[in-house]
Amino acid sequence: MHHLTPDFSSGFSRRRRRSSLSGYTLFEIMLVLGIIAVLVGSAIYMLSGNLDIAKEQRAKSDLQAISIQLQTYELLNFRKPTTEQGLKALVQMPTSEPKPQHWRKLWKDESVPRDPWDNEYVYRNPGKYKTDGFDLYSLGRNGKDGDPENIGR
């Protein structure tokens, strides 16, 4: 004779099997996250060279802007600031001799910018490397004077 009682166990196992097939296991999720981490890490590594190039370009741009302001300073005062007065003379009136005749604040900020590696730009007047003018350059990423990687020297 045939039993008419419902078989709950077969329906439960089918549901359980269906739900485990529709989800992802922890291993699969961790594998995908690992692959994504490797891809992001390699992309960052590949772009790190571009960051150095961008910093060099910013330093060159800063040097050009500072050089223009030094020329303006010279037009107003008939000479560029001395090494002692430094680039600070573009934002504060020098107190040492030779004092400027027609001083004006020529840099919009309160201080002259620092290079992308957070060093001060080197300014010498008269120049050590350009004996017929002035030196203005960045120490670059190594931060050492006289290094071949100095920018603008």
Image: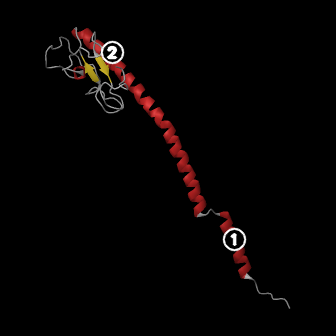
Q: In this picture, is 25 found above or below 51?
A: below
Which residue is under mark 1? 17
| Depth check, front residue: 145 or 41 | 145
Q: Look at the numbered disc 2 and give the secondary structure of its residue.
A: helix
**Where in the figure is residue 96, as x and y percent of width and height?**
13, 18
Say left or right for 26 vs 51. right
Q: Residue furthest bottom?
A: 1
Inter-mark Cα distance, 1 to 2: 75 Å
Which residue is under mark 2? 68
- Which residue lies at the image location 23% right of the left edge and 16% below the top edge? 104
In primary-sequence order, the first of circles 1 and 2 is: 1
| Depth check, front residue: 123 or 153 | 153
| Depth check, front residue: 75 or 38 | 38
Say left or right for 24 vs 59. right
**Amino acid on which disc 1 is placed:** Arg
Q: Look at the numbered disc 1 and give the secondary structure of its residue.
A: helix
Q: Residue furthest right?
A: 1
**Amino acid on which disc 2 is placed:** Ile
- Which residue lies at the image location 25% right of the left edge and 11% below the top edge? 74
